[in-house]
Image (cartoon, rainbow, N blue to C red):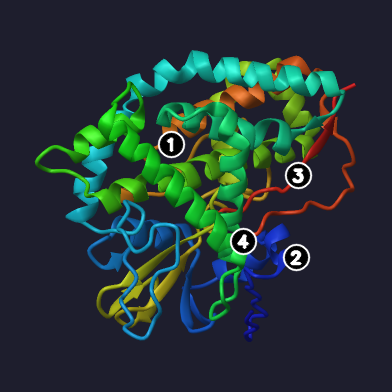
Amino acid sequence: MNQAAENIYFNPWDPAFRANPYPHYKPLLAGPPRILDLFGPTAMVTRYADVTTALRDHAHFSSVRPRDPNEPHDEGPFAGARTMLFSDPPLHTRLRRLVSRDFTPRRIRDLEPRIREIAKNLIDAAERKGELEVMHGIANALPVMVIAEMLGVPPDHYQQFKHWSDTVVSGDNTLPGTPLPEEFRTAKDALRSYFADEIERRRKTPGPDLISALVAAHDDAEAMNADELLAFVLLLLLAGNETTTNLIGNGMLALGRNPAQMNLLRETPELMPRAIEEILRYDGPVQSTIRFTKEDISLGGTKLPAKQGCFIILAAANRDPAQFEDPDRFDITREPRDHVALGEGIHFCIGAPLARMEGAIAITAMLERFPRLRLADPAAPTIYKGSYFLRGLASLTMATD
């Protein structure tokens, strides 16, 4: 989108850029935050030290987009309702407290046997086909089936949920100022209608599921209102399943392109926790997030005016040579160095333990079942889905014989 004297190119709407943005981060990492013209001045925050400073300083870097009275009504899936992702304290504190009880380490551990069972069933189906399409067969299905069960809705609806989710997320690839596609509006309305009905059903007949637990919290003195409750359920479905899907897909692509690392992981399964952290660092499921300055402030040597939009590029920070030695090398034995793939500060991903568990279970199951697993065509171009922010593969075929 923008060329500068340093030959900087940054265009998240360009499919070739999304296919491999990492070379384009290098000139941005070489100096202080630049302000580029991305349909308006945007600060590009890429260096690890600058990214962590901004993410930890919610007093100066807000998650709430400044209101523009000339902008049309919010057409996104949350319909203007505040979520944890796009709020600051004290609202963020209240919302996170209300949902955190359902994401405790114990609750996540209790899900492990069922996640293993779902993964086994999916791999059984893939084995019968004689070829493993990682995205369709495993990565797309597992996270959304797990979330569907957590929410208490039939897991056999997962294909419909995934279609809606992919369509809504692909709306990120709509050029600013361009009308959102009709299929986006249709999927967004269908998602909202479906879960509004599910919430109302749980209000009348509670069960042992997450929606019922959130409805009960909603009915307490300090609670989410109806719009916040619906927005959180949609956030869980959209962000929760997309990030884990991308973790599994990006991880299998990295392992497939580095067969020595795949063999090492197969032979040394105790390296799986480190492998998951390296996958997150090397090619994380979220490329960037956005913040807005609350007042004039300096970051990394760049003066930013109040209400300045900032791209906080997590994936660039995770390739910063000032923080990570030889950052472009994929190495599952690497000592973890506090990557920011899952955020930092008060907005650190609440579902991080679940995502890590699902990723580890899925990747372990594939490596164990298919001892000769490899990329079907290492030279094949990689095709990515529509969103730069939630950057993930559209497909990934691996040979199993």
Q: Is label 2 in a helix, a strand or a loop?
A: helix
Residue 170 lies, in percent from the top left, at 61, 59
Q: Amino acid at mark 2?
A: Ala
Q: Amino acid at mark 1?
A: Ala
Question: Can residue 342 be seen at all in this image of the molecule?
Answer: no
Classed neighbour count for the residue bearing mark 3: other residues with Cα under 10 Å, few (<14), some (14–19), many (≥20): some
Q: Nearer the viewer, mark 1 or mark 3?
A: 3
Residue at image coords 33%, 19% = 106
Q: Nearer the viewer, mark 2 or mark 3?
A: 3
Residue at image coords 76%, 44% = 395
Judging by the rendered image, the residue that carries numbered circle 1 is 352
Q: Is label 1 in a helix, a strand or a loop?
A: helix
Q: Amino acid at mark 4?
A: Glu
Residue at image coords 53%, 83% = 39
Judging by the rendered image, the residue that carries numbered circle 3 is 395
Residue 169 lies, in percent from the top left, at 56, 56
Judging by the rendered image, the residue that carries numbered circle 4 is 183
Q: Nearer the viewer, mark 4 or mark 1?
A: 4
Judging by the rendered image, the residue that carries numbered circle 2 is 16
- State how far apart marks 2 and 1 are (Cα): 29 Å
- State how far apart marks 2 and 4 are (Cα): 24 Å
Q: Quadrant of residue 77?
A: bottom left
- State how far apart marks 1 and 3 are (Cα): 24 Å
- State how far apart marks 4 and 3 are (Cα): 21 Å
Classed neighbour count for the residue bearing mark 1: other residues with Cα under 10 Å, few (<14), some (14–19), many (≥20): some
- State how far apart marks 4 and 1 are (Cα): 30 Å
- State how far apart marks 2 and 3 are (Cα): 16 Å
Report the front residue among 358 and 61.
358
